[in-house]
Amino acid sequence: MVLFSLMRADSAHIFSGRNAGTTQVERACKAILRTIWVRDMQPGERLPPLRRLAATLGMSNNALMPALDRLAEEGALERRLRSGVFVLNPNAYTGSLWRIAILENIRDMHAACPFESLLVAYIQYELTQAGCLPRIYFHHRQTGRIAEDYPDCVADAKKGTLDGAISLGEFDPKGWDDVAPGMPLSVFFWRPRNSAVIDMDAMRDEAGKTLRARGCRQVARLQKGNATQDFLLQTEDEAPLSVSLDRSSTELDSDFFLRGGRALAKRVLRLPAHRRPDGFIVFDDYIGAGFTQHIRDAGEYRPRVAVLTHVQNPLVFSIPVLRFEVDILALAQAGVAVFMERLRNPALPPRVERIAPRLAPD
C-alpha cells in the first residue's frame, strides 16, 4: 500500500500532458515507462500488481497486459513467474513510441542556411534514435504567437496526437503552456528552455583572448540589440553605442542585419582614430558581412574581426576574419538529450545545455 500511495502522489507528474498514440498499447507503454522514470525506479525493483497498476494509471487490465509483454520483449522489464514484473532497463525500449513536433523557423527563404537545415536533420535523427516519431511544422505567419504561427501543430496538440515539441521558431513559450499544458517543449534559440544553446559568453571570452593574443589592445562587441535598440556596439570601458534602423514589413532578416553591420561600421568610423577599437567580436554572420564591407570601402583602417559563423552561409567577408563555429551535431545531440529527459520525466526541472563555439582552422 505504501508503493501505491506514493505512485498516486506522483500521478500528476506522470500524466502532465497526454500520452499520444494510435493504440491503447502505445499509450500504456508510455504510461508505464513514465511511472518508472518519475519514480526513479531502479533495475530489480518490482512494479505493483496488475490491478493496482491499472487503477493507478487509470487504464484497463486489457491495455496494460500487452504493454507489459511488449516492454518485456524489448528488455525494459522482466516478468518472473509467480513473482511479478520487475524493472530491467527502461531505456532499452527504442521503438517508435513518442510523437514529437519540430517547429521550423524558415521565415527568410532567401537566407535559408546550411546551419538550420543541418540542425533540423540532426534533431530528426537523434529523436528517431531515441524512439520518437518527429514531424516538422512550418510557419503560417510570424507573429510570435503559437496559435497563429503554427495552427496545424496546435490542432494536433489539442487532439492528443503529440507528446512534445521542439521549437526553432520565435514565439512566447507561455503560449505553448496555454495550448498544451504540461506537454514538454524544447526551445533552442529564442527564450531557450529544455534544450541546448550556443554559448555566447564562451564565444566572447575565447574570441577576446584570441584577439588580444594577436595584438589587439581594445576589443569591442557588435550584436543584435533589444526591443528599443536594433544593434549595439559595446566597448570595454564605455557605454554602448546603439543603432536603430527603419525596417519595412517585407525586408528580409538577412538584408536588415547587413544594413545593421554597415551602420555599426559608420558609427565606428565617426569615432576619433585613437578611440577606434582594433578588435571586434561579432555575434552574427550578416552583421559581420555588412560591417567588414563598409570597413573595407572606407579607407586604411583594418581592425581584426572575430565572427560567430552560426548561420554558416557561404558569406563573403570583405576583410580577413577569425571564424568561430559551433558543432551542429553536438548542439543537436545535447538538445535532444535534455528534451528526452523532460519528455520521459515531466517532473524534472527545466535546464539548458550550452555548447561553446570554437575557432575554425585558418
Image: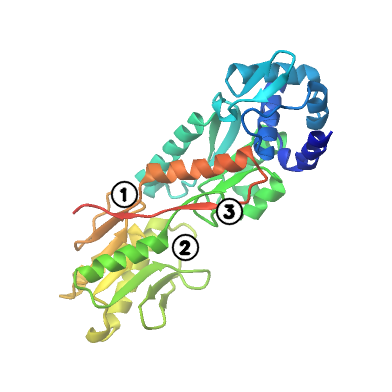
* Residue identified by numbered label 2: 248
Disc 2/disc 1 C-alpha distance (Å): 24 Å
Q: Bin the neighbour count of mark 3 within 10 Å (Cα to Cα): few under 14, some 14-19, many 20 and up.
A: many
Which label was assigned to residue 171?
Answer: 3
| Residue 40 seen | yes
The residue drawn where x is 54% and y is 33% is 135
Identified by mark 2, the residue type is Ser
Q: Position of residue 229 (x, y in %)?
A: 47, 73
- Figure quadrant of the N terminus: top right
Secondary structure, mark 3, is loop
Disc 2/disc 3 C-alpha distance (Å): 20 Å
| Residue 152 seen | no
Q: Earlier in the sequence, mark 1 or mark 3?
A: 3
Q: Are marks 2 and 1 in contact (CB under 8 Å)?
A: no
- Is residue 226 depicted above or below 85 in this figure? below
Q: Position of residue 327 (x, y in %)?
A: 35, 47
| Near-viewer residue (288 or 39) | 39
**Extreme residue toward the top, this view:** 81
Disc 1/disc 3 C-alpha distance (Å): 24 Å
